[in-house]
Image (cartoon, grey):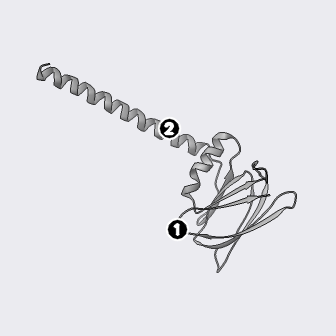
Amino acid sequence: MSSIQAFIVSKKLRRALLACACAACAAGAFGAAHAQSAMPQWKGEGAVRYVCGGIGSDESNAMRAAMKDHPLALLFARADGAYLADVQVDIKGADGAPSLALRASGPVCLVDIPAGRYTIDATTTGGDAKSQSVTVGGGSKTASFRF
């Protein structure tokens, strides 16, 4: 193979690799955009906001993938492991930290809340209640409630 032929082959190989890299980036961007579009609407504003969902596989996958990006994630399930929705949640802050009351419309809630100690009270429509204390800050914290 002459040096000219080698140069042409090398140039074609670089183009092919660049095309593959561009396609991979586009696929990743599409996947991220798709995951974002599968998320329900956020509620609240400023330092305290939340989103609840996780009904349906796309929404559930998007919510679970986003858990690591938020200070607090709440999971709700029955004792047998089946997802549970329609849970009343009251998050009470200690030492002047903000408080939040919400109705979980799905089994997963992502909560953006300032660092601090909180007590989370969760009550099902059937009246079963659970409580947990958490310290938020320095990474994502998950509180799981099984009824």
Judged from the image, the secondary structure of the residue bearing numbered disc 1 is: loop
Q: Residue furthest bottom?
A: 95
Q: Residue at x 32, y 33 (%)?
A: 18
- Could you tell me residue 45's position as x and y percent? 62, 62
Q: From mark 1 to mark 2, how far is it between C-alphas?
A: 30 Å
Judged from the image, the secondary structure of the residue bearing numbered disc 2 is: helix
Q: Residue at x 62, y 43 (%)?
A: 38
The residue labelled by disc 1 is 138
Q: Nearer the viewer, residue 74 or 80?
A: 80
Can you see residue 141?
yes
Position of residue 25 in the picture relative to residue 127 (left or right): left
Which image quarter holds the N terminus?
Answer: top left
The label number, if any, that marks residue 59 in the structure image: none
**Sequence order check: which comes first, mark 1 or mark 2?**
2
Task: Give the residue type at disc 2.
Answer: Phe
Q: Residue furthest right?
A: 126
- Could you tell me residue 66's position as x and y percent? 57, 52
Can you see residue 44?
no
The correct choice, above or below, for 117 with respect to 73 in the image is below
The residue labelled by disc 2 is 30
